[in-house]
Image: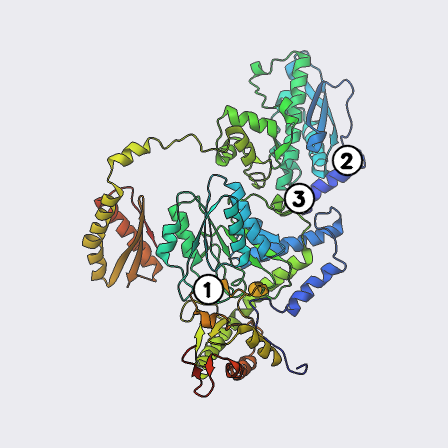
Amino acid sequence: MSDTPLIFADNNATTPVAPEVVAAMQPFFGPEFFNPSSMYEPALKVAGALKAARQTVAAFLGGVEPSEVLFTSCATESNNAALFGVAAANPKRKHVVTSAVEHPAVLEVCRELQRRGHDVTILPVDRQGRIATADYVRALRPDTLLVTLMHANNETGVVWPVGDWARIAKETDPGIVFHTDATQTAGKLPLDLVGELAHVDLLSFSGHKMHAPKGVGVLYVSRGTPLRPYLLGGHQEAGRRGGTENVPYVVGLARACELAKEHAPDMVRIGKLRDWLEEEILRTVPYVEINGRGVDRMPNTLNMACHFIEGESILYELNGYGICASTGSACSSGSLEPSHVLKAMGVPFTAMHGSVRLSFSAYTTEAEVKRIAEIFPKVVANLRNMSPYWDQKRNCPRENA
Amino acid sequence: MAWEYSEKTKRIFMDAVQGKPGTHLGEIENADGVGQHGSIVCGDALKFTFRVEKNADPLRDVIVEAKYLTFGCTSAIAASEALCALIEGHGLTPIQALKIQNKDIVDFLEGLPQQKIHCSVMGAEALEAAVADWAKKRGVDLAAQGVKLTGETAEDDGRVVCKCFGITEPYLRRKIKELNLRTLDDIVSALKAGGMCGACRYAPGGLQDILNETWGTGEPAPTTVAAEPVAEAGPSPFQLYRKIEKVIDETVRPVLKGDGGDIELVDIKEWKVYCALRGMCAGCMGASRTLQLIVERTLKDQVDERIQVIPV
């Protein structure tokens, strides 16, 4: 196995750090180690790098004000800061709207708000992972404090029209704050917070899903959004997030934002490869369902549910071929519970445990995708040969399965 | 973030600290005007003194020397120096000197970072206090001269809440009650506090907290009471929905269908009508905006002026 070339197809979990990003960060581990808040001349250069990084991220978000960009340690922190911060700043409103398929970094915060006395509406999704507009409109109430709905789902890649939903919320009641977790879309789809997403008040994303390292994130806070600081401390980030700025990582994130623009054509290429692989697998593997097929979806994500076999064993076998994939969200892999996302989508129980997610990046090659197309049907066939629910002779499920 | 000072600010600071000739660090003994502003608690404090060439008519006294003692940061010291430079040797009477505003100090320094503007405010306030002191000593009735002092001497000893404008907590608390300021917007328009960087709005101990402590966090006094009888006199929700549906079915939809489009009523909340515009019109931003306005106008005319159409 050691001489098998690695095929990394788990980019929704994390991404390799781009060499350009590493190079951009390097000086700040060496001669440019200063605290950007310090007064002496050498520190001013570091403060300048921080300022430039903030401007780059502001431009990456469609040309927002640099002061609207807050640097955090990860998307989970951004989500916590957004949700708890909005709740603390608006004690009079007690209703939160979210969805059944959010990442735990939003869902668990919503559950905590519920324990603290908030009323939380969890919107259901259909088999394709979509929310019915009528459900969304009905959920908005006169006491609605916050709407938090993700831009794209980490497991299925299904993209939601959060720009429209934010507008509907604002036209219903300008007092409603709209938050979106854009961790999966940042760097892959355009995030235009002065255009399509102009009504979004708060947006979270992290660096390590877009070829920056782990440990850095962003919270975009539209000017005027009522938000109580969550991490109290020094004057950093204009008092909205204490703690000495993580300059090397922030600089790396900014470099990754620049690279994302250069990678835009790759996303089109990746989308075509994904579509080809999807058709190929549907052609060669019986009893497989594509989750999120036919709806607006991230170009890099392919989530499949294979009936009658178990996801972990699929991963294990793929691993033997050097292919890195995941079954549902990496975050839910600690428990034996099947993915809450697939459950909410109503994926049949027999297939839920056999879900596999492949997620590509700008660095994925055509040869890699072809290799997956070659290996994957073999892996599924092998496991089905061992499955008590599979009729090996007729190559279909047993009658009593 | 380290502060970015103008070259002139840095130079003035360095000159003052090194006591170069022509700088104004110090205190005039038996000064004709003494003014103080700020306190150690605030992080910066300024003692400003000036000497006049006395005239038989005190109103013709001319400031000939100005000095300061400043406890504070680079910009506080530079602003103090700037104040003295603006006042000394220009043949100004104390009352004329009052025309110097914090803005003049900022201009003299070729700009100050936003968060440091309060340093220039401090200079202007200390000047005002010194002129008041001079007037008292010389028996000049400033009010009779048409001079209105704005300084809040006692209340300046307090925690600075809005750092951009150097506005203190006691001052805020008094003004919030005096002017019946109920919201952050009220405060910004009346006092400027929170109007620049906005960081003090929701910070712990910030403007929203002070508002909550002053007025309580309960529901504000109901100001919409008057609206209810009107609503009672209007149609019931059921009647309203029927009416809206009827207008959409009989007037709006046939028109849209004529152009290959359609409309679907998704929900109605109070006066907000949510509808999906389908068919030919869907997907065209310009067309759907126009359609929204046409549908809204029709419903306003035929059902109620308060109706708002929200496309979904």
Secondary structure under tag 3 reads loop
Label 1 to label 2, Cα distance in Å? 71 Å
Task: Determine if marks 1 and 2 fall on one subunit.
Answer: no
Using a 10 Å C-alpha cutoff, classify the residue at mark 2 as few (fewer than 14 neighbours), some (14 to 19) or many (20 or more): some
**Residue B54, relative to residue A150: is it above or below?**
above
Secondary structure under tag 2 reads helix
Q: Residue at x 68, y 58 (%)?
A: A248
**Residue A165, relative to residue B2: is it above or below?**
below
Q: Is residue A177 left or right of residue B261?
A: right
Q: Position of residue A367 (x, y in %)?
A: 56, 82
Q: Amino acid at mark 2?
A: Ala
Q: Amino acid at mark 3?
A: Gly
Q: Which residue is mark 3?
A: A233
Q: Which residue is mark 1?
A: A343
Q: Chain of mark 3?
A: A
Q: Nearer the viewer, mark 3 or mark 1?
A: 1
> Residue A293: in sight, yes or no?
yes
Using a 10 Å C-alpha cutoff, classify the residue at mark 3 as few (fewer than 14 neighbours), some (14 to 19) or many (20 or more): few
Colour approach in the figure: rainbow
Secondary structure under tag 1 reads helix
Q: Nearer the viewer, mark 1 or mark 2?
A: 1
Q: Amino acid at mark 1?
A: Lys
The disc label shown at residue B243, or none: none
Tell me which label, 3 or 1, sits earlier in the chain.
3
Mark 3 and mark 1 residues within 8 Å of each other at the beta carbon: no
Label 3 to label 1, Cα distance in Å? 41 Å
Q: Which residue is mark 2?
A: B16
Using a 10 Å C-alpha cutoff, classify the residue at mark 1 as few (fewer than 14 neighbours), some (14 to 19) or many (20 or more): some
* Residue B145: quadrant of the picture: top right
